[in-house]
Image: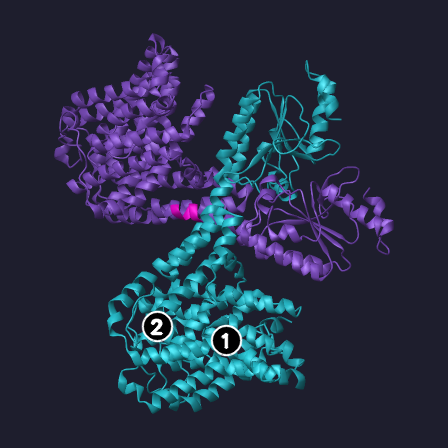
Chain colours: A cyan, B purple
Amino acid sequence: MQLKTYFPILDWGRRYNRQTLTSDLVAAVIVTIMLIPQSLAYALLAGLPPEVGLYASVLPLVAYAIFGTSSALAVGPVAVVSLMTAAAVGRLAAEGTADYASAAILLALLSGAMLTVMGLFRLGFIANFLSHPVISGFITASGIIIATSQVGGLLGIKTEGHTLPQLAMSISENIGTVNWNTLAVGALALALLLWIRLDLKNWLNRFGLPKGVATIIVRAGPVFVVFLTMAWSAVFDLGGKGVALVGQVPQGLPMLSLPSFNADTMQALLLPALIISVIGFVESISVAQTLAAKRRERIDPNQELIGLGASNLAAAIGGGYPVTGGFARSVVNFDAGAATPAAGAFTAIGIAGATLLLTPFLAMLPKATLAATIVLAVLTLVDFSILKRAWNYSKADFAAVAITLVGTLLLGVEVGISLGVGASILVFLYRSSQPHAAVVGQVPGTEHYRNVERHRVDTVPGVLSIRIDESLYFANARYLEDLVTNQVAANPGLTDVVLMCSAVNAIDMSALESLEAIHGRLSDLKVRLHLSEVKGPVMDRLAGTEFLAHLSGQIHLSQHQAMLAIAERRLARPAPGVREHLGVMI
Amino acid sequence: MQLKTYFPILDWGRRYNRQTLTSDLVAAVIVTIMLIPQSLAYALLAGLPPEVGLYASVLPLVAYAIFGTSSALAVGPVAVVSLMTAAAVGRLAAEGTADYASAAILLALLSGAMLTVMGLFRLGFIANFLSHPVISGFITASGIIIATSQVGGLLGIKTEGHTLPQLAMSISENIGTVNWNTLAVGALALALLLWIRLDLKNWLNRFGLPKGVATIIVRAGPVFVVFLTMAWSAVFDLGGKGVALVGQVPQGLPMLSLPSFNADTMQALLLPALIISVIGFVESISVAQTLAAKRRERIDPNQELIGLGASNLAAAIGGGYPVTGGFARSVVNFDAGAATPAAGAFTAIGIAGATLLLTPFLAMLPKATLAATIVLAVLTLVDFSILKRAWNYSKADFAAVAITLVGTLLLGVEVGISLGVGASILVFLYRSSQPHAAVVGQVPGTEHYRNVERHRVDTVPGVLSIRIDESLYFANARYLEDLVTNQVAANPGLTDVVLMCSAVNAIDMSALESLEAIHGRLSDLKVRLHLSEVKGPVMDRLAGTEFLAHLSGQIHLSQHQAMLAIAERRLARPAPGVREHLGVMI
């Protein structure tokens, strides 16, 4: 049992048959075709030689097939993580150096170790602190930065930087050195890719091709663009005309190796590795769960952490860089019918074959083609509609999106996402430190008590019922004291105060001391303090405290019973002028 | 009106009369006698020349009298803030240098500016994030560190450091160089001070002295010890025998001046200034509110920020260092009958007089006497009982105390308090990310619904009512999805799910998307989703969302009404085997 949890392959492997094999093989072919240009392009985006993208698309996929639980998730290089890799590693080493490549491998190792540990210790909840608005803002900003970073590749000019201002400055400085041949290749590639995405399918359908064949041709489109521009480059000697080409690439797969350790580099990469891990996990788990729900399958988030961790460890051993589950490829994998994680392993075989066969030709491939591939891929990430939806729903959520988006654009990916997470948590803490509270009365004809300001309710003179809409803890303990003190001051002639605790999910020690202070002040004024609707877990905690032992009033199961008990006590010894109001309550 | 808010003196000044004047004068005399040795000692603790303590006890008190709202708060140098000053400034300059003194002044300036800004922008709630357990742990640890730091002064050996291990190491290294004359003075001072505190009053009473006179003599005791050891030092030439003396002190008060600005120093002092400001404010406001409550007076926390801010700005101008309201002196001030903040201004006049008259004599005062004064003062801060109380009440609160206490002892005041605040917030976030939830049923004979596992309640087959005990936000949104999915999976044959939202105080955008996801999954299973007891502020937010527009079930005012509505609908079109259960509900 235990073994099957950690090695899901033992579970689905048993039920593997000819039918699932066929489905997986078909999906693998389609994903392989899609992955070849993407893996080359994303490696360039990460500031690495293009073949590293291929390396990162072999072992990690095999590792995920063993440890992962999603049948559709397509692991490998993805745009956002590539950008984050470039930002993290770019601070430590110059692009193109051996140090740069080994830092990228170390980053994959650290990220893999963190994900695995998080999975083993079931720390997946950490990812919950990335709210949806923060992720949306981050992904949109990343898409804009990535697209901008490719402008240089499309124009044949040098650009630098990982933030929008740096890139814009860099582009404007070098705009005079545009290489027109590069621009021509880039524009053609971009136009073709756009046409393939938007129009090719309809066009093929009009020619009467079966839908399945048309889909495969559309998926293979980008590979066709790669070959076309490669041929153009070879025939017209674009390299000689100053067009940047991929250049000589080592043939075959690299030897398995462990990255070299360097304490300083490792320390500098710890935080980026954590952010990459969490972002990668959140993105993967969202896609995986969405796709799994469509087939009524279940995803185990903690096992997914282990699966992605193993993938990244494999990426480190296999000379790659950080990987995660890609959104677009996973959807394609799902649509193509991938039935088990084995589809990923078959994709790995496909990429390994391509690495052996393709590398001799890659030398002639213009980098502009890959830039065009990236721009097309990331345009789908950019989605400003979240800003409008957040604005309409809540200004706090809007602030989280806006801070993350602007922070990422202006200050970079790591600062941007940290600002977003920090801002969301601060907003939550601030709100809970200034809780909503309501004076409540009885909804006529029911035993239900609601806010006197929002509902037509009956109240009883001399009795103040306050519902506090928050757990009581240190940040709002003093606020509670002020609230009750002010309410009591505004209601002379009180005999009883009832704190309705239906929304109080915890009372910490600071709040307990505030309750004691409130109790003391009310006792001085001869006002009794009651609690109603105290929940089980809170009651467990209060049991045995001095506060409960000395409480002037009582703890009542429900607000209604509190009111009945107070009324009964008054009937027994009525205060002058109160008797006539009791009818309301009973 | 506006003016009176910011200048409370305009309010109480009007009502000032001969009676309040007399009360204030008596209190001022007693506090002045107490403050003279304390101010000298705390300045030494802060690593500053002793006269700086006197300077910090003049202008700040006048400033507080103008801007403060507490009639009893005695502002001036205090032990914990002096320790924090030493820790902050000690990192930037060597003790005894001009840079050290000017950094301390800059620290007071920054702290004053921060407090004033916090007051003007009503940011007093920031102080709420210092929970009671964290403050208790911090104060106890500070007391231990301060007492240990004075061991060197009592033994006549050199010690260094602001953490317990540093101090212990330093003491053990230099224990061989004990000066026996210093030890003798120190031991005598300590013994006398202890006797004065514990026994003198009884002794005087036994001699038949009136209680008031006895109290004044006890308060004056420490000043007597100062004079006694000063005389001993002069007669036996202790300075010549290697006993550290206070030494030549400039006579009179310093010229008013603005501290010199240095951008680097300022940046390094920003965080310490913030921590000192918040700690000082929390300590002051607690004392001020406790004392005000005894006289039914009110303290305005935001105006207190301005009052303490003005005091620290005045300390900076007057050549002092950070000040705040002291616990022990405020209680004495209160007991002595201080009727208005003017008592503080009179104390300032007393200290100014003492500064002019006393300084010639101070040269002969052994520093060991001041060390003994400090040890006696801080022993009251050390209180381990909080550990036991926290352990009994909640392990989370215990963790906060323990982390703060151990962190402060081992890593210093700033790291310690930051760890404590960080840990409390993390615990709160973690808990709210894993909320308690209960399946609820009807308490027989009432309209009240409670946890099926804790109460004997009635439920209806086919209807699942879940009460979620937390606001729904990004950190628990995914948890909610899992919870409902698992509950639904465990209850086949469901027709209706009711989310009882009595404890849901907010629903953010991430949680709204989770609700939509839950709604989608339930709709696929032909299960209707209802909400009950949704609060006004939450309802305001949900109004106009897609979620509400497409909700398969309804929003019900109360859980009971939800159950009634579901029953009615079933009666209209009863499902097989359900009719017989309806009796339970109506």
Circle 2 SS class: helix
User: Which image quarter: residue A292?
Assistant: bottom right
B73 vs B96, nearest the viewer: B73
Q: Chain of mark 2?
A: A
Residues shaded magenta: B418-422
Residue A254 visible at all: no
Q: Which mark is residue A103?
A: 2
Give the residue at x 55% y 42%.
Answer: B392
From the viewer's perspective, is residue A77 above or below residue B571?
below
Position of residue A124 relative to residue A573, above or below, is below
Q: What residue lies at 85% left-to-right and 44% top-to-bottom? A: B583
Is residue B371 found left or right of A372 in the rendered image?
left
User: Is residue B419 part of the magenta span, yes or no?
Assistant: yes
Q: Where is residue B402 shown, x and y percent of the image?
A: 45, 46
The type of residue carrying mark 1 is: Arg
> With respect to residue B328, does B568 lie above or below?
below
Q: Is residue B355 visible?
A: yes
**Can you tell which mark lies on residue A197?**
1
Where residue A436 sits in the image (x, y, percent)? 55, 37
Task: Where is residue A443? Give x, y as percent.
Answer: 70, 32
User: Which part of the image, by quadrant, shows the C terminus of chain A?
Assistant: top right
- From the viewer's perspective, is B433 left or right of B22? right
A300 vs A569, left or right, is: left
Q: Is residue A200 above or below residue B139?
A: below
Task: Report if the CB atoms under discs 1 and 2 are less than 8 Å apart.
Answer: no
What's the chain of the residue with tag 1? Answer: A
Of residues B148 and A343, the one nearer the viewer is: A343
